[in-house]
Image (cartoon, rainbow, N blue to C red):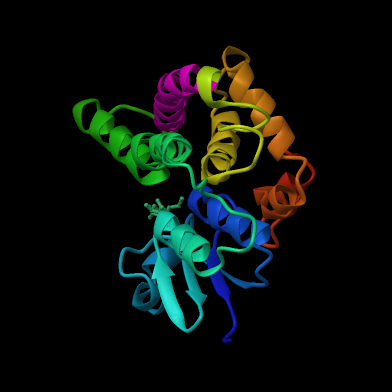
Amino acid sequence: MSETVLYSYFRSSCAYRVRIALNIKKIPYEMKFVNIYTGEQKDPTYMAVNPSAMVPSLMIDGHMLRQSTAIIEYLEDTRPSAPKLLPNDPHKRAAVREIAEIVACDIQPIQNLRVSAMVADFCQKYQPTITDDERMKIRNDWSREVITDRFRGIEKLLASTSGDYCVGNGITLADVFLAPQVYNANRFSVPMSEFPLISGITERLNRHEAFVKAHPHSQPDCPPELKSSHN
Ligand SMILES: N[C@@H](CCC(=O)N[C@@H](CS)C(=O)NCC(=O)O)C(=O)O
């Protein structure tokens, strides 16, 4: 079998999901780092790998895969005997997907850096006197409000689905998606005290080796000044 290579950026929540899934499935992988802050995702060499100019991308079994959900589903389909991320029971499976999709479709695409920069650009268009500090505040406020609003829905769902983890007592795809989103929530000072179920689940997840190894601050491309903090 050919080597597995993940194109990653330490703070990308979508790459973080894939790192967790690879670790849970115990698939050895190498990483190539794409610094999305300095624009390396738009480099023609990387765009030949991923025409959407985004991380993650994963080379596995001789295939180049993109989109974190598609990648993790591929891992689940091709490594079904490894710890399963999707329950067999259709109702539980739908509950797992529901939470994962709130993160993947209703939070991350609206909260991400590309969109928060566009929001600040729009504000600047109508109020050109906005300073760089104000731009940063707009971006952080935007991300915090989007995450807070959607976490309110997830917290309510968890009241009927959760055990130790999002759905019951086993780690599922929902947890693989939730933990990276909580990392982002902490970055943007989301008031996590409002979300005791999400917080408790994340605390338990963050004790698992697969999650510890995948954490942004454990990544070789994480700047040293961030490595000591685990928020
Ligand atoms: N739906 C995609 C989203 C990927 C995505 O948004 N990646 C972000 C980092 S989390 C990125 O590469 N952003 C670079 C940019 O927007 O220029 C997935 O799940 O893989």
Image quadrant holding the N terminus, namely bottom right
* Stretch of the chain drawn in magenta: 133-158
Residue shown at 74% from the left, 39% from the top: 230
Which x, y percent locates residue 45? 40, 79
Q: Quadrant of residue 184?
A: top right
Q: Is residue 16 above or below residue 32?
A: above
Residue 198 shows in the view: yes
Q: Nearer the viewer, residue 42 or 102?
A: 102
Image quadrant holding the C terminus, namely top right
Q: Is residue 165 above or below residue 149?
A: below
Which x, y percent locates residue 49? 39, 76
Check if residue 203 falls in the magenta segment.
no
Which x, y percent locates residue 186? 60, 30
Residue 74 left/right relative to 185: left
Q: Nearer the viewer, residue 96 or 9?
A: 96
Q: Quadrant of residue 55?
A: bottom left
Residue shown at 52% from the left, 51% from the top: 12
Residue shown at 33% from the left, 41% from the top: 115
Residue most toward the top? 194
Magenta span main SS: helix
